[in-house]
Amino acid sequence: MTSSKDSIQYQSCPVCGMGFRPWRAKQVGDHRYCMDVCNACGYCFVNPRPSLSFLMEYYSTFGHGDADSGKAPPTLAQVTQNERVFPNSTVDARRLVNTISKLAFTNTTKKFLDVGCGYGFFSAEALRQGFDVQALELATNERRIAKELTGLEPVASSFEDYQCPAGSLGVVLMSQILEHALDVNLWVAKSREFLAKDGILAIALPNYGSFFRRLLQERDPFVCPPTHLNFFNPHSLSKLMSKHGFVIEKIEWVSRLPKSTFQRRVPSVAKPLLPVVHLGTRMSLGVIDMMRLGMIISVYGRKTT
């Protein structure tokens, strides 16, 4: 790995240490982001990397959404209304925290760290299930909404700067956040340090090995540097976690599309057919998940020693 004041350039795969090849590039504004993919584990990553100072400023200003959308920050009412129209974060939060609860039953501590909590849906579900939650979030508006939703005061800290006593946590959750990290090894290593024996690290993120990414290649909406810097498939993410001493307990594949995806595109005369279209879509996505080609993966690792 070589570095400069403004960027870091990897010379080998940061997950497995093997060689890589150029994959694609994307132009965002006046910057062109090049992406490489490992020949061995399949991890894909932006290379060279932006500087950490650039990323901290970027996320504290824009959060984890589209920085170029030009939209005003949403209110709690708008966020909860959007969730009612398209239940997504609440459904994912229930699924992830339910799985964590089943895996964490042997833990001696209920302390739960939600890294990059966003609007707070996962923290809210963890609180509902009896965990003692601490949340981290850099984005000002997302912290405000998370506080309104949960009553918690999220810490305005990056995971790089965050500190807590070694072995003090029962769970570290990274939902839709590790794809943003500058140094994925640092994040997973710190998680292991913070977790008690039998503690659970749960990571959910877009699946680089999904059917849709294979079909769309760099046009996949999840391939969006500099918002996303890391593109994992189940093998590369499991490899990263195992490298830092985690035993993989479970992997889940989940695909979901909002109904509006089709409602905007179907002619008025065909609107009565939408329920059939939605049913067919759910069934098709279910088959894709069964084939382990789903859009989102969740990997659960246990610290055993």
Image (cartoon, helix red, strand yellow):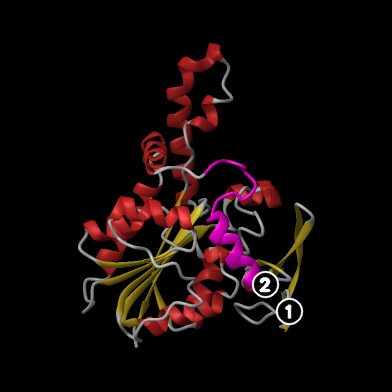
Q: Are marks 2 and 1 in contact (CB under 8 Å)?
A: yes
Amino acid at circle 2? Ser
Please give left or right for residue 224 compared with residue 59 in the image: right
Q: What residue span does the magenta drawing correspond to?
A: 53-72
- Whether residue 237 appears in this view of the structure is yes
Question: At numbered mark 1, what does the secondary structure look like: helix, strand or loop?
Answer: loop
Q: Residue at x 56, y 25 (%)?
A: 264
Residue 25's mark?
none
The structure residue drawn at horizontal position 38% and vertical position 36%, both measured from the top left corner, is 81
* Residue 292 % position (x, y): 49, 55
In the image, residue 207 lies at what x, y percent?
A: 55, 57
Q: Residue at x 22, y 56 (%)?
A: 128
Judging by the rendered image, the residue that carries numbered circle 1 is 5
Q: Which disc number belongs to residue 51?
A: 2
In the rendered image, the quadrant that contains the C terminus is bottom left
Q: What's the CA distance linking mark 2 and mark 1?
A: 7 Å
Q: Is label 2 in a helix, a strand or a loop?
A: loop
Query: Is 7 within the magenta?
Result: no
78 versus 118 height, above or below: above
Label 1 amino acid?
Lys
Q: How many other residues sit within 10 Å of disc 2, few (<14), some (14-19) or many (≥20)?
A: some
Q: Is residue 108 left or right of residue 213?
A: left
Q: Nearer the viewer, residue 18 or 88?
A: 88
